Amino acid sequence: MLPANAHTLLEIALRTGVIYLLVLIGIRISGKREVGQMTPFDLTLLLLLSNSVQNAMTGPDTSLAGGAVAATTLLVLNYLVAELSGGNRRFRKYIQGQPSLLVHDGVVIESQHG
């Protein structure tokens, strides 16, 4: 038998999944960056973004169970994206992008994107 608040917890899982996809797409569109290449501005933006979407994930539910469902959903989605990226080159290309060759045989490669 499901607990009385199961509907709320399932809604939190769904909302969290939608926000995860939106943030993942937004970060991917914003450019190719690794954590080590982030500027203080990028890190600040990421932290503020995570705080701003928290209410969209959990809504008015501030319970421990609601937070646990949101956190678990994020961890599971992240695991699934990593697994799909490892096994599917096309998916990995869209999620992670492709590296840019900057130097070849000691010669700097000029940008071909204007």
Image (cartoon, rainbow, N blue to C red):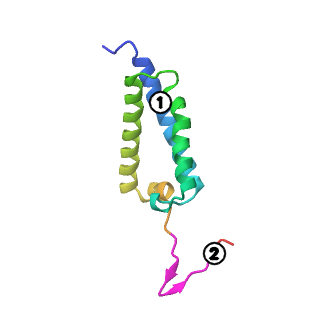
Look at mark 1 in the image and give the residue it sits on. Answer: 14
Snapshot quadrant of residue 72:
top left
The residue segment tinted magenta is 100-112
* Magenta span: chief secondary structure: loop
Note whether 84 is above or below 49 in the view shown.
below
Q: Local crowd at mark 2 within 10 Å, few (<14), some, or many (≥20)?
A: few
* Farthest front residue in view: 40
Q: Return the residue nearer the eye: 90 or 61.
A: 61
* Farthest bottom residue in view: 106
Question: Of the residues shown, which amino acid type is indicated by label 1?
Answer: Leu
Q: Quadrant of the N terminus?
A: top left
Residue at image location 47% in from the left, 57% down from the top: 96
Question: Of the residues shown, which amino acid type is indicated by label 2?
Answer: Gln
Residue 75 rendering spot, x and y as whole percentages: 37, 40
Helix, strand or loop at mark 2: loop
Which label is found at residue 112? 2
Helix, strand or loop at mark 1: helix
* Farthest left residue in view: 1
Q: Quadrant of the C terminus?
A: bottom right
Q: Local crowd at mark 1 within 10 Å, few (<14), some, or many (≥20)?
A: some
